[in-house]
Amino acid sequence: MTNKNIKKTTIILFSLYFFIFGWLSHSQYESVLRFIFPTTLEQIKRDGVLNAVLLNSPSTYYIGADGPKGFEYDLLSAYAKYLNVKLNITVANTTKEALELSKDSNIHITSASLAKTKDKETIYNFGPSYLEVQEHVVCYRGMLLNGKFPKDVDNLANLKITVGEDTSYSETIELLKADGFEINATYTSEYSTEELLSKVASNEIDCTIVDSNIFSLNQRYFPDIASAFTIGNREQLAWVLAQNSNKLKEDIYSWLNSFTQSGEMARLKDHYYGNILLFDYQDTTMFYERVKTRLPKYKDLFEKASQKYEIPFSVLAALSYQESHWNPKAQSSTGVRGLMMLTLNTASSLNVEDREDPKESIFGGARHLRETIDLLVKEVEGEDRIKFALAAYNIGMGHITDAQSLAEKMNLNPNAWQDLKKALVLLSQKKHYNTLKHGYARGTEAIKYVESIYNYRDMLQNISITDTNGAS
């Protein structure tokens, strides 16, 4: 080999050496950097904990009879499960408090029914949208009688309005004022949105502003509130993420897309918002009146039956109200009667001798519901087991199994209530029921029946023990 070739080879080898050394050094450096300065997503996975701020409210997070509940809590829990990490919750009582807590460097996600507004997007790092809402002006229903109930923004001039401080609602009012509207509004950090709705219901203030989902959830709890009109365009709710957490945001986008495509998002929305359109002012007012006058007479019986048959008290009481309005002498033209409206054949099979006897009826109905729950296949899980059983209580187990078969033929999940409903509505159509073992059924009525019971159940769970002598 000539000296020229040796020199050339040496240069190439040295170049290759320095390239490999540099590449390895850079890789090690990057690894060290990632260890010392991990991304937010890497830190969550490394520590095994997702630190979240959650607003204490019916639409976000609250402690129910069976533990933590709330649309946003369930959504956030599903994401934590996907990451295989523990969800560590810090509770906030107002939107302002939630936003203040979000600035803590240890907080990864803040969930507080927060709308992505132009002002807030300049301050906070929002993740992907998960729910679309629209703001409602909500006022005291009694103003309909004196002509003060507002029809548009011009009618707000002389009304007492209070909204949460540092919320999308206060931003809306400021924008309206900038457009020249005269609005007498107060901003508060002392009360939550739900507390302000309570003040509207008791006529302490005339109106407030809330998102459509919050209004819908609370309308049945405060029958004396009413939506006057909507304001502005539809808005997107989203979580606030820690600053400089692009990898976390990308991961949430990817997960949320999969969660939606799998049908889980639809099931979650149906669980919390599926029965909110059932509100009827007179029916709701009468329900609250009978909670005070009728329910206390049978409360102990419902509680004992609940314990014996392992069915929530609120479900049994709500089922009974749906059937009889807690009237032990109730009877229909078809021959069903009593607090749980048992048929003669069902009562006989349950050894119920007197269907109008409150104890026999309640325990018989609870046993019937428990036996129905136990008949369901194990693939029907969680709350859906009760919903399937209630539908069967209404139209019979045979029609439920027919609907499951139909759902399967439609490539739907036969063991999920959200999908079963799509099949139930078809049971009254000849082209479908002609092919099914048990024939025709009013499946739509069964859906309304279940959702009405859950509406009453939710109202019962929202009433304090002191308000109902223990009915909660």
Image: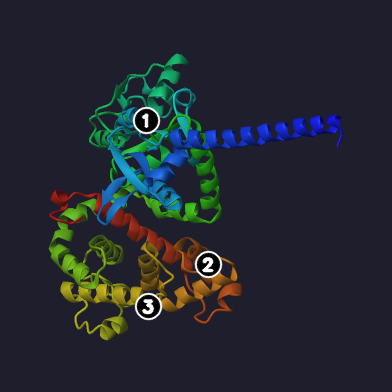
Q: Amino acid at mark 1?
A: Ser
Q: Secondary structure at mark 2?
A: helix
Query: Can you say whether 382 is above or below 104 in the image?
Result: below
Can residue 128 be spotted in the picture?
no
**Residue underneath mark 3:** 375
The answer to which image quadrant residue 457 occupies is bottom left
Q: Is residue 444 left or right of residue 341?
A: right
Decide which of 185, 60 is in the foreground and name it.
60
Query: Can you say whether 39 is above or below 464 in the image?
Result: above
Circle on res. 105: 1
- Graded by Cα atoms within 10 Å as few (under 14), some (14 to 19) or many (20 or more), the crowding at tag 2 reads many
Q: Secondary structure at mark 3?
A: helix
Tag count: 3
Decide which of 165, 346 is in the foreground and name it.
165
Circle on res. 423: 2
Q: Identify the residue at horizontal 48%, vertical 73% (top origin).
A: 441
Quarter of the picture containing the N terminus is top right
